[in-house]
Image (spheres, helix red, strand yellow):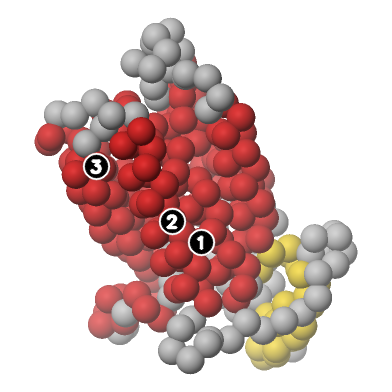
């Protein structure tokens, strides 16, 4: 079991924001280098990254507000724009980023699959870095557990009709998500030793992330303050995982016979 700690801000810098920003920067640098090495336009790559980031942050915030915690915002709509206070949905980010990226790629009529693979290949390690921020502040607490990778964390639990702060051993979904992303990164690096058909990294990213994520979300806490909303017993992220897995499977099936590097 991992020990308890409280990662507070360093001056004005919050740990979550720091690692998310670091992940974005590293992801863009990696994508720029990979695009240049593969003969793609770095100008297009920069514009594509900008559209993905804008769409991603907007989608992440909106899904968090409307699918997870609408009750917290419906009487104070001004809080919706205060993204710096936290409150993001990973699947909202995927949806928004995908919309932004597809819009740009279709509008510019560049090689969709080539650029999509470059972004997918570099997005996963960037995502793993961003999840360090989630782990630092334990903002994705799971169920009580004695699992060796469980973390002692401070949570607000309902006891005798009142919310009480407790330090308890729980699954840390941000930590697990980071480990999952690291594992996918290693798989991609191994695959990258020889040419692959274009669309592989996009499809594999969707499939390899979505299936484990569906089961990880089943570990989310239900007994804490602001537990994730569930619809018919599933979290929004679990529904997102089903859709993402189907998309990934469809991409891999339809692109499987494409020539290597095309």
Tell which of 85 and 30 is nearer to you.
Answer: 30
Q: What element carries label 2?
A: helix
- Whole-percent x and y of residue 175? 66, 60
Tell which of 105 and 152 is nearer to you.
Answer: 105
Q: Do the residues labelled 1 and 2 touch (CB within 8 Å)?
A: no
Q: Which residue lies furthest to the front in this view?
A: 37
Instruction: Quote the CA–CA distance across marks 1 and 2.
Output: 10 Å
Instruction: Quote the CA–CA distance across marks 3 and 2.
Output: 15 Å
Q: What element carries label 3?
A: helix
> Nearer the N terminus, badge 1 or badge 2?
2
Residue 255 seen in the current view? no
Residue 165 seen in the current view? yes
> Nearer the N terminus, badge 3 or badge 2?
2
Q: Left of 173 or right of it: where is 144?
A: right
Q: Do the residues labelled 1 and 3 touch (CB within 8 Å)?
A: no
Q: Left of 43 or right of it: where is 19?
A: right
Q: Left of 201 or right of it: where is 43?
A: left
Task: Tally the numbered discs.
Answer: 3
- Whole-percent x and y of residue 25? 39, 59
Determine whether 103 is above or below 140 in the image.
Answer: above
- Whole-percent x and y of residue 176? 67, 55
Q: From the viewer's perspective, is the residue at label 1 or at label 2 nearer?
A: 2
Quadrant where the image shows the C terminus = top left
Q: Which mark is residue 130?
A: 1
Residue labelled with disc 2: 26
Q: Residue 19 carries which label?
A: none
Residue labelled with disc 3: 42
Category of crowding for the residue at label 3, using alpha-carbon neighbours closer than 10 angstroms: few (below 14), some (14–19), many (at least 20) = some
Residue depicted at 45% across the width and 73% down the height:
17
Tell which of 64 and 161 is nearer to you.
Answer: 64
Category of crowding for the residue at label 2, using alpha-carbon neighbours closer than 10 angstroms: few (below 14), some (14–19), many (at least 20) = some
């Amino acid at each position: 079991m991992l020990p308890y700690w409280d990662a507070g801000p360093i001056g004005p810098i919050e740990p979550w924001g720091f690692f998310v920003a670091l992940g974005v920067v590293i992801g863009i640098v990696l994508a720029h280098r990979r695009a240049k090495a593969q003969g793609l336009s770095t100008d297009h790559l920069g514009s594509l990254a900008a559209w993905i980031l804008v769409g991603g942050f907007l989608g992440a915030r909106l899904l968090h507000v409307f699918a997870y915690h609408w009750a917290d915002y419906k009487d104070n709509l001004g809080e919706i724009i205060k993204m710096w206070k936290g409150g993001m949905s990973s699947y909202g980010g995927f949806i928004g980023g995908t919309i932004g990226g597809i819009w740009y790629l279709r509008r510019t009529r560049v090689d969709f699959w080539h650029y999509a693979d470059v972004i997918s290949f570099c997005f996963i390690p960037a995502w793993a870095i961003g999840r360090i921020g989630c782990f630092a502040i334990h903002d994705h607490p799971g169920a009580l557990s004695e699992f060796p990778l469980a973390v002692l964390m401070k949570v607000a639990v309902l006891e005798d009709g009142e919310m009480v702060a407790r330090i308890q051993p729980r699954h840390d979904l941000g930590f697990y998500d980071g480990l999952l992303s690291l594992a996918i990164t290693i798989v991609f690096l191994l695959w990258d030793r020889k040419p692959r058909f274009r669309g592989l990294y996009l499809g594999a990213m969707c499939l390899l992330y979505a299936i484990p994520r569906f089961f990880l979300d089943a570990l989310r806490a239900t007994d804490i303050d602001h537990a994730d909303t569930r619809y018919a017993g599933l979290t929004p992220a679990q529904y997102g995982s089903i859709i993402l897995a189907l998309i990934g499977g469809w991409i891999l099936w339809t692109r499987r016979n494409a020539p290597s590097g095309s």
